[in-house]
Amino acid sequence: MKQVELDKLDQRILAILQQDGRISNQHLAEQVGLSPAACWRRVRALEENGVIKGYSAHLAPERIGQGLCVLVNLSLQRHTIDSTADIERQVSSYPEVLQCFAVTGSADFVLRVVVPDMVSYDRFLNEKIFTLQGIAQVNSNFALREIKNTQTIPVGSGDEHS
Amino acid sequence: MKQVELDKLDQRILAILQQDGRISNQHLAEQVGLSPAACWRRVRALEENGVIKGYSAHLAPERIGQGLCVLVNLSLQRHTIDSTADIERQVSSYPEVLQCFAVTGSADFVLRVVVPDMVSYDRFLNEKIFTLQGIAQVNSNFALREIKNTQTIPVGSGDEHS
DNA sequence: ACTGAAAGTCGTTGCAT
DNA sequence: ATGCAACGACTTTCAGT
């Protein structure tokens, strides 16, 4: 159970819903050329089979005093399953950490951290990162500018068939 | 014109809307303890002053055949304003590039790229990255696992006053 | 800045195709 | 998998406090 077959209609629905998650079902229906009922059933199916994981409001960090964004490269000392799982659990629980990926390359993890300012980031490092067990290196790259920041995944690019 | 004052009610509204962008105004109102009308006016104000930038559906990449995520470190040869702006414009236009930040550290930009597979990634590099003018280095770090991936910005953490 | 009510719009279901 | 129709629920506005 992994990939889901999407026809052109599903793809259009997903594209629109990624752009405007709060569009009314009626408007969505007319934009894809379906009756509201048919459209609604498709959306519901996409939610139920896990293609649509949820909906969220998108905020402006700088407007709510969370203007500092840092990309952190983390390296571990040892790579036992237990200590790694533990670090992942802790890192996930920090609200300042918006994203965290285990990656190839010289670091083991890359995090995206959002905080109000340098003072807060200093506190974050001292209280929540440096206290983790088994950390070898922490490399902080500060975001100077946000060129693009979306979670809009391409749909219907690549190999289609229906 | 930058930061916006948020009281406890606004903060709760934003926290809830980040978790469930499609919650009905009525449910939102009762969860924050306001009448639907009052709640609606606050949400509308938050949208109008740019705190809420929009709403979107959150998809599962692996379910729609976009299972490969790559963190790319880009370095430029020269840093003239023109060539940089040009690269930023082009990179922004690529749907495979979900995020792009100008950063401190050894790279100039970090991108998050999402594609179906290695073949697609190879094509992406050859057609869209290597063809950019003035690129010095491209370093691809593949995401092995997604530990956390949200755009949920902390609200009402840090210095409050109302 | 809030509440309450009114009017219009929308989501959701059942039924038939 | 679709469209139509119906009912209840919701959004949005406006007058009053």
Image: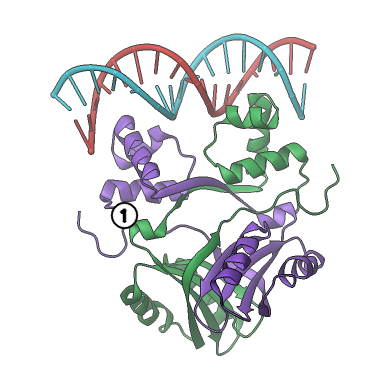
Chain colours: A purple, B green, C cyan, D red
Name the residue located 55 percent from the left edge and 90 percent from the top edge. Answer: B77
Q: Which residue is mark 1?
A: A1
Query: Relative to the observer, which residue lies in front, B45 or A96?
Result: A96
Q: Is residue B48 visible?
A: no
The picture quadrant where one finds residue B129 is bottom left
**SS for tag 1?**
loop
- How far across and how far down the image is residue B59, in percent? 43, 53
Name the residue located 61 percent from the left edge and 71 percent from the top edge. Answer: A83
Chain under label 1? A
A130 relative to C17, above or below: below
A5 relative to A77, above or below: above
Q: Left or right: B115 with respect to A129?
A: left
Q: Left or right: B87 with respect to A145?
A: left
Q: Left or right: A19 with respect to A39?
A: right
Q: In the orientation shown, which residue stands out farthest toward the right?
A: B161
Q: Amino acid at mark 1?
A: Met
Name the residue located 37 percent from the left edge and 38 percent from the top edge. Answer: A44
Quarter holding the N terminus of chain A? bottom left
Q: Is residue A91 visible?
A: yes
